[in-house]
Amino acid sequence: MPQLQISLSDEAVDFIEREAKARGLRTSSELIQELVDREQANSRNELDQMLIDSLDSGPAFPITDEWWEQKRAQAAASMPAATR
């Protein structure tokens, strides 16, 4: 398994070691792996939710060059004249 060397404060190392022991883990590496796994799962869940939200956001329509031109014109019209 690949290894990663990181620098942590003494307080962070103490916390990791205490937390690993409290969870019944053999090493602090196991705790770090659990935390990384959990964060990856959370990221996947967030992405899944964004995809679901986009599917529920209304009917799909094509994004054309004309659509972009209209959006740019709307954005420019909403900006103060000095910043255009």
Image: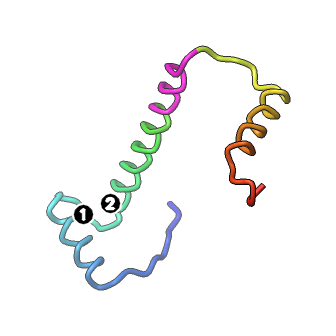
Q: State the residue in front, 9 or 77.
A: 77
Residue at the far right in the pictured view: 65
Task: Name the residue type under label 2.
Answer: Glu
Residue 49 horizontal/vertical position (percent): 45, 31
Query: Which numbered mark, 2 or 1, is in the foreground of this view?
Result: 2
> What residue range appears in magenta?
49-58
Q: Residue at x 52, y 22 (%)?
A: 57
The residue that mark 2 highlights is 30
Q: Quadrant of the C terminus?
A: bottom right
Q: Is residue 71 above or below residue 39?
A: above
Residue at the far bottom in the pictured view: 10
Task: Name the residue type under label 1.
Answer: Arg
The residue that mark 1 highlights is 26
Q: Could you tell me which secondary element the residue under label 2 belongs to?
A: helix
Q: Residue at x 48, y 76 (%)?
A: 5
Contact flag, marks 2 and 1 (Cβ < 8 Å)? yes
Mark-to-mark CA distance, 2 and 1:
7 Å
